[in-house]
């Protein structure tokens, strides 16, 4: 894959932190974007090396990793993507104040509104808590499409958070999301980053399944925050809480989330189908499968597609059990692709431009 043509592109983009898996996906998508040219990639690793020396799927990009300040990375650019780890993006807040470019951050540093919740789940005091006062728009287009299109700063959601929120948003709007919801979600190893750790080392992970951070994952508070906002936007006064168990799965990419929701006995499968089809009728990257086919990772790998399936139980007392399953690629819709989807909206482009290629098969 070669460098995108800046002479014909309408907009210019740069990436800060381009050596990780999230950065790799941003680079891959931007190099093939018809309207946005990738002009610069900064990093503290592999400085001076061509991009293709690190990301072996690329070829002759004409770009190298540069160790340069944020202002220089953003020079003459319309949008800057921060592909940095949690607790690093927030340290750049003062430098962002003077940028003319729009910014999309892929870390968790600007998603939450409560500094105390940030401290609890990320293990440090937020160095610039005033940044959590609403100046960053939460980058979930399926809920905040209009706000994102007007934004200068977008905090892109986490991969688990995206998977679970997209399963439950239609229920929030319909007033069917209340009380605790139980979710078990399995994720691929790329979500743990490009550098091996004892828990993600391939010989251990390849033949294993295990839970981690049960009931305490850092994506839990952003899911609760956003879904409670969605409930309020729908005109309802119920309160949502999540009990979430993440599972480390032996695959490189993908997330499959299974969400268990109790619904009134009066709500049947045809009504659930109507709720989901209506909510996602203007979201072409979301595929509502219903009960005809279950969501699975192999069908969305490498793409922006999100598959949503559901099963409704028989009546149990005055309730039914609803299972909603969602599958997405954690590096694309759960990461870089969603960030680019938000950037498209911010730049006035069709939201699916440059990111609507089919999934890999098999």
Image: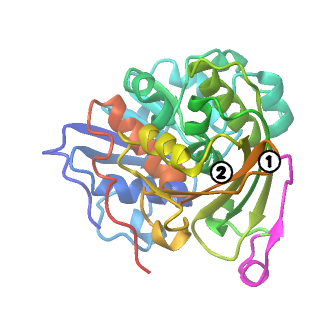
Which residue is painted at 53% across and 43% down in the image?
Answer: 271
Q: Quadrant of the C terminus?
A: bottom left
| Residue matched to label 2 | 160
Q: Earlier in the sequence, mark 1 or mark 2?
A: 2
Disc sitting over residue 217 in the figure:
1
Label 1 sits on a secondary structure element that is loop
Colouring convention used in this rendered image of the protein: rainbow
* Residue 127 vs residue 187, the one in the foreground: 187
Which residue is painted at 43% across and 57% down in the image?
Answer: 305
* Residue 92 vs residue 350, the one in the foreground: 350
Can you say whether 116 is above or below 325 in the image? above
Magenta span main SS:
loop
Judge from the rendering whether residue 271 lies leftward or rightward of residue 164; answer left or right. Answer: left
Tell me where residue 92 sits by quadrant. top right
Q: Position of residue 309 (x, y in %)?
A: 55, 58
The magenta region covers 200-219
Judge from the rendering whether residue 253 lies leftward or rightward of residue 215; answer left or right. Answer: left
Label 2 sits on a secondary structure element that is helix
Q: Position of residue 107 (x, y in %)?
A: 62, 41
Q: Is residue 203 magenta?
A: yes
* Residue 310 vs residue 248, the one in the foreground: 310
- The 10 Å Cα crowd at callout 2, few under 14, some 14 to 19, many 20 or more, is many
């Amino acid at each position: 894959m070669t460098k995108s043509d800046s002479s014909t592109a309408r907009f210019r983009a740069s990436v800060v932190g381009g050596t990780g898996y999230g950065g790799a996906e941003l680079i891959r998508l931007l190099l093939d974007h018809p309207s946005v040219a990738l002009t610069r990639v900064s990093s503290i690793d592999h400085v001076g090396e061509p991009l293709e020396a690190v990301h072996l799927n690329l070829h002759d990009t004409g770009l190298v990793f540069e160790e340069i300040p944020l202002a220089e990375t953003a020079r003459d650019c319309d949008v800057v993507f921060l592909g940095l780890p949690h607790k690093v993006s927030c340290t750049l807040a003062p430098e962002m104040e003077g940028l003319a470019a729009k910014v999309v951050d892929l870390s968790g540093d600007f998603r939450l509104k409560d500094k105390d919740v940030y401290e609890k789940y990320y293990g440090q005091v937020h160095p610039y808590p005033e940044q959590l006062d609403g100046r960053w728009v939460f980058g979930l287009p399926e809920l905040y499409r209009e706000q994102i299109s007007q934004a200068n700063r977008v905090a892109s959601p986490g991969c688990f958070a995206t998977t679970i929120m997209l399963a439950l948003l239609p229920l929030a709007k319909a007033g069917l999301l209340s009380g605790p919801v139980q979710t078990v979600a399995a994720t691929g190893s790329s979500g743990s980053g490009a550098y091996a750790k004892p828990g993600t080392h391939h010989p251990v992970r390849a033949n294993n399944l295990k839970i981690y951070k049960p009931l305490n994952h850092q994506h839990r508070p952003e899911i609760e925050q956003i879904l409670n906002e969605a409930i309020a936007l729908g005109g309802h006064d119920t309160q949502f809480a999540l009990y979430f168990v993440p599972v480390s799965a032996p695959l490189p990419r993908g997330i499959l989330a299974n969400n268990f929701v109790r619904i009134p006995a009066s709500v049947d499968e045809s009504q659930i189908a109507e709720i989901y089809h209506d909510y996602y009728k203007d979201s072409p990257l979301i595929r509502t499968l219903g009960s005809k086919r279950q969501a699975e990772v192999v069908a969305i790998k490498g793409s922006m597609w999100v598959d949503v399936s559901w099963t409704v139980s028989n009546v149990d007392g005055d309730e039914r059990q609803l299972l909603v399953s969602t599958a997405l690629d954690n590096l694309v819709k759960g990461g870089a692709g969603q960030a680019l989807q938000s950037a498209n909206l911010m730049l006035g482009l069709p939201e699916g431009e440059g990111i609507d290629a089919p999934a890999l098969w098999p």
